[in-house]
Image: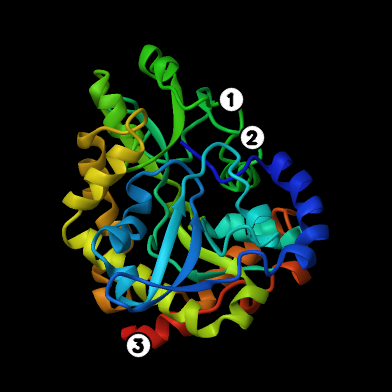
Amino acid sequence: MKYLNSTLICFLALATALSLSQIGCDSAKPVAKKNADGKEMQSVSLMLNWFPEAEHGGFYAAKVHGIFEKYGLDVEIRAGGPAAPVAQELLTGRVNFAIGNGDDVMLFREQKADIIALLAPIQDSPRCIMVHADSPITNLNQLSGYTLLAGAGQPFRTYMEHKGLLKDVRIVPYDGKLANFIADKKVITQGYSFSEPLVAKQEGAETRSLMVSEIGFNPYVSCLIATRGYVDKNQDLVGRMVIACREGWQKYLEDPKATNELILKLNPQGMTAEALEFGAQAIKPLCLPQGMPESKLGSMTLERWKTLSEQFVEMKLAEPANVQADKVFADEFVKRSGNE
């Protein structure tokens, strides 16, 4: 499916963004204003890592249901897309917050971008390798001899290669379309468990999803991220933003209908009502896995980040000093929201 920034584009652009970060760090400074009821609001911007989809549902729910307003925030949500430049936009101060996955945060930090995660609504990664339902493949150790549709430069693919799971696997670029997969049962594809399986079913193919998280690579997904500098300078605002986004996700998991209607209006070419409904239901166990209580929604642990950091170092995707686990996230705002 999608992936936040192609690695090459990201790395090239980050160099420019880092040089401009000091100049533009205050360009998106919140501006106080009042709503119709006279309540003081602060304007902030949030950039997505892709076009609006179910994986952004909680953030849109906070807007649809007035949760941002409840916390004195006037939030502009900006859609992303292929190679969405969220790191550059954050570093230059053109946006205050963005959405990114845990592995993206690691890639940014390896390039000396001091970006941190503040909230992790999707605990278990939806990243999967999708095979045909009647395929003899039942786990990710059985891919030899198949053709895999996968994007280049993605850490999950590097991890699979590092673990020897792609030996004798022919890898061809994934363009987001499933025509080759549908036509050939010797073709398998990367995907998100709440997206590609439904698309394949609509095109007449029954599938099985093999979760990459089950082999140990499980970064947090759809994290709320920002630069450390912005967080340090805007503690109160950041705290309210985190709480509002967390409540938005609680609302989306409880009742996604109104939010999905907005997402469909914003992304009519890439989404259908059925896909959004399927996605909202499939996301629930990823947000609250294995009986995780709702009070823990969005929380992060040092242990999880340490595991991801060690994997990046082991795969030679990062130097240890650049991805220190205790430096890549800030969980105090989630804790303040009353989940612990």
Q: Earlier in the sequence, mark 1 or mark 2?
A: 2
Element marked by disc 2:
loop
Residue situated in front as seen by the camera: 231 or 6: 231
Please state which of residues 135 and 38 is positioned toward the viewer in this rendering. Answer: 38
The residue lying at 39 percent from left, 33 percent from top is 130
Query: Mark 3 or mark 1, which has the lower sequence index?
Result: 1
* Image coordinates for residue 195, horizontal then vertical, percent: 34, 38
Give the image location of residue 188, x and y in percent.
Answer: 44, 26
Cα separation, mark 2 vs mark 3, equals 39 Å
Mark 3: which secondary structure? Answer: loop
Q: Using residue 235 as the reference point, say whether residue 265 is left or right of it.
A: left
Q: Is residue 110 above or below residue 14?
A: below
User: Dot 3 corresponds to which residue?
Assistant: 340
**Residue occupying the far top of the picture:** 183
Residue 332 in sight from this viewpoint: yes
Q: Are marks 3 and 1 in contact (CB under 8 Å)?
A: no
Front residue (pair 183, 233):
233
Q: Is residue 315 above or below residue 275?
A: below
Identity of the amino acid at label 3? Answer: Glu
**Up-down relation of residue 244 to residue 55 (above or below):** below
Disc 1 and disc 2 in contact, CB within 8 angstroms? yes
The amino acid sitting under disc 2 is Ala
The percent coordinates of residue 184 (x first, y second) are 40, 13
Q: Which residue is mark 1?
A: 173
User: Can the viewer see residue 219 in this picture?
Assistant: no
Q: Which residue is mark 2?
A: 152
SS for dot 1: loop
Disc number lying in front (3 or 1): 3
Name the residue at 71% across, 40% down.
Answer: 9
Neighbor class of circle 3 (other Cα within 10 Å; few <14, some 14-19, many 20+) is few
